Image: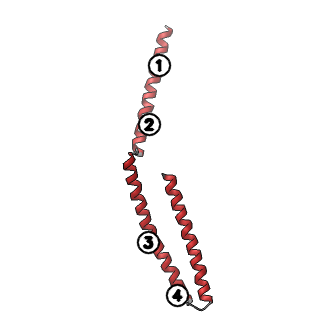
């Protein structure tokens, strides 16, 4: 799931980057053809960047919400739960090792 989210975010960044470059190219072309002023072009690009940041924030919030919902639906273990289980397993392994060693000593006698 993490990999999918990471790839989705990277894809989104790539799309945004491409769109910004294309917009910048088109604005420069319009300025060159005297269809818009340089100031209007800068304003357009600035507005695009501003809207993109707002959309990114909304998208991140939605992704986080969906990830939490997904985790609840599939009952994924939390990191602290996994760490707790690891500690228990290590303790049990140590106890088992001690008992096995004691049993071997008793069998040799």
Q: Mark 2 or mark 4, which is nearer to you? A: 4
Q: Is residue 70 above or below residue 90?
A: below
How far is mark 2 from mark 4, CA to CA?
60 Å
Q: Is residue 57 above or below residue 75?
A: below
Within 10 Å of disc 4 (Cα), the crowding (few <14, some 14-19, many 20+) is few
How far is mark 1 from mark 3, CA to CA?
62 Å
Residue ID for mark 2: 86
Image position, residue 109 (x, y; %): 49, 7
How far is mark 3 from mark 2, CA to CA?
41 Å
The mark that comes first in sequence, 4 or 3, is 4
Q: Dividing the picture into quarters, in which one does residue 83 lie?
A: top left
Q: Residue furthest bottom?
A: 34
The mark that comes first in sequence, 1 or 4, is 4
Q: Is residue 50 above or below residue 71?
A: below
Image position, residue 20 (x, y; %): 56, 74
Residue that appears at 42% across and 41% down: 82
Q: Is residue 12 left or right of residue 74?
A: right
How far is mark 1 from mark 4, CA to CA?
80 Å
Give yes or no for contact between labels 1 and 2 (Cβ–Cβ under 8 Å): no
Q: Mark 1 or mark 4, which is nearer to you? A: 4
Q: Secondary structure at mark 4?
A: helix
Residue ID for mark 3: 54
Residue ID for mark 4: 40
Residue that appears at 39% across and 46% down: 74
Within 10 Å of disc 2 (Cα), the crowding (few <14, some 14-19, many 20+) is few
The mark that comes first in sequence, 1 or 2, is 2
Q: Is residue 46 above or below residue 104?
A: below
Residue ID for mark 1: 100
> Toward the viewer: 30 or 85?
30
């Amino acid at each position: 799931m993490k990999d999918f989210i990471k790839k989705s975010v990277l894809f989104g960044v790539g799309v945004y980057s491409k769109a910004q470059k294309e917009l910048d190219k088109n604005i420069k072309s319009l300025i060159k053809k005297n269809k818009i002023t340089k100031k209007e072009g800068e304003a357009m690009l600035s507005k695009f960047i501003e809207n993109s940041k707002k959309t990114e924030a909304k998208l991140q919030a939605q992704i986080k919400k969906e990830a939490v919902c997904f985790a609840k639906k599939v009952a994924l273990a939390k990191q602290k739960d996994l760490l707790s289980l690891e500690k228990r397993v290590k303790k049990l392994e140590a106890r088992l090792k001690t008992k096995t060693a004691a049993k071997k000593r008793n069998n040799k006698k």
